Image (tube, rainbow, N blue to C red):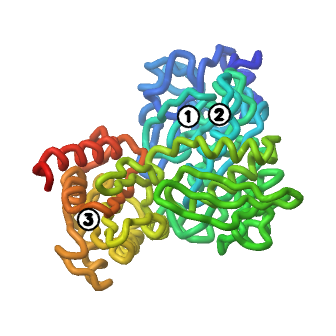
Amino acid sequence: MSAGSGVWHLRDLLRDALGVLRDDVDDVRVRGVAQSHDRVVPGSLFVARVGRRSDAHDLVPAAIERGAVCVVGTRSGSTHVAGGVPYVHVADDRWATSALAATFHDHPSRALTTIGVTGTDGKSTTATLLHHILQGERDDAVAGLLATVGVRIGRSHETLPGHFTTPEATEVHAVLARMRAAGVTLAVVESSSHGFALGRLEHVAYAIGVWTTFTPEHLDDHGTLEAYLEAKRTLVRRAPISILNRDDPAFAAFAAVARSLRSYGVHPDADVRAERIDVRATGITFDLVVRDHDPITVALPMVGTFNVHNALAALAAADLVGVPWHDGVRSLATFPGVPGRMQLVSKEPFGVIVDFAHTAPALAKALAAIATAAGGRKIVVIGAAGERDPGKREPIARAAVAGADLAVFTEEDHRSEDLGAILATMAASAVAAGARPGVDFLVIPDRREAIAAAIASARPGDVVLLCGKGHERTLERTDEVLTWDEASEVTAAVRRARAATPEGA
């Protein structure tokens, strides 16, 4: 049995996690749960998941060679596999992975006040803002964050591999267990629709749910808009209280399934409201209006009007766990920003911003939110990912040429798809929208060259917006995966452009 620190024997783990009683297995000690064979260590329980493109049962021999003491999967009719290692049949291997991981780590989310943040756009920023408020100025670990931008336990920060908003259940519960061990009491978990639909968050116990926005996205995975909506609403159904965006058109759909709710926005009926919003190049100010409180002026050192909503959501959640409004506002004034989320990389002689926007609505919002100097232009670098919903490509191109004076279409993780075909689709959509090739938009397949071209075309007063990669640390091509840091790439491009500019030009 467990001693409260992930110490389990096989029979006990199978019984408590899966409800499986197996007296015919050796009661060996289990030292971990893995759903990837290369993460197996001696003593691991290996879940041989069956995916759309691969079947991990093919890797069972490799997992056993690495030391797996049990295999769990959906194949029936077998009780043991190679070397006499027990095989346990389950109906749903994703659910089983989550149940085993949560049980192995003694359900860490139950020991924490776990706050989930979901939404099409804004969830990473809102989650990071909330963690910043909750941690405050404390040096000891009070709050933890599990998000696309990485893991934070108190003030420590680390990145996670891959491009997943929500990592696999094995990683989710391992991270939450590390938070618990470090003394964290408040955990903020960015909770994606994939995380819910694929069972990665199945056994996370939420105390509060925060919802930001809802627009069509990920239909290649969810199939229909209704299925995507249901995946997003999972958080609201499961959380005892939810914080919902009163200004989003989908508010009623989320409110309908909320067990209890608090709303935020600029809507006059919002419980937590922003008034007198003032957006400037250096940041945003607004008045925070809450019932039974005098208005509080908020100074937010961020770019983008939509960050007002992200800040409201974070303040509302922080209040629910006992952070006074004034303390939350004071913390926001020192917020350092989110890597790859409207990240201001350079101010002079023109602005350069890196953002993760990779959908048409997010791109349109980002372009609308940036302010140029009088006579300044907006220049955007954007692509569309391969092996993802192809229906996103034309809307992205239209949003780019509609919101920017110059769009540069380039690569964005095209993977096995033909990059030329992706860019041809985007170019054709731009032309259909009335944009002129070579004038209103350029097509430059190599992303580094596209960035250089955008920087070279910028003049004082302009703003260059780099979209699609944001915080990600790799760039995926057909036959290679490049190490990639968009902010560093842009900084280097600006430096090279300045060095190439004659003195006084």
Q: Quadrant of residue 423?
A: bottom left
Residue sitting at x 48%, y 22%: 64
Question: For the residue carrying disc 3, how many other residues have a C-alpha within 10 Å: few (<14), some (14-19), or many (20+)?
Answer: many
Residue sitting at x 32%, y 84%: 433
Give me the C-alpha separation between circle 3 and circle 2.
38 Å
Q: Does the rendering let one see residue 81? A: yes
Residue sitting at x 75%, y 52%: 316
Any mark on residue 144, and which? 2
Q: Nearer the viewer, mark 1 or mark 3?
A: 3
Give me the C-alpha separation between circle 2 and circle 1.
7 Å
Q: Secondary structure at mark 3?
A: strand
Residue sitting at x 30%, y 78%: 429
In this rendering, position of residue 344 left or right of residue 386: right
What amino acid type is highlighted by mark number 3? Val
User: Which of marks 3 and 1 precedes in the sequence?
Assistant: 1
Q: Secondary structure at mark 1?
A: strand
Q: Are marks 2 and 1 in contact (CB under 8 Å)?
A: yes
The residue pinned by badge 1 equals 151
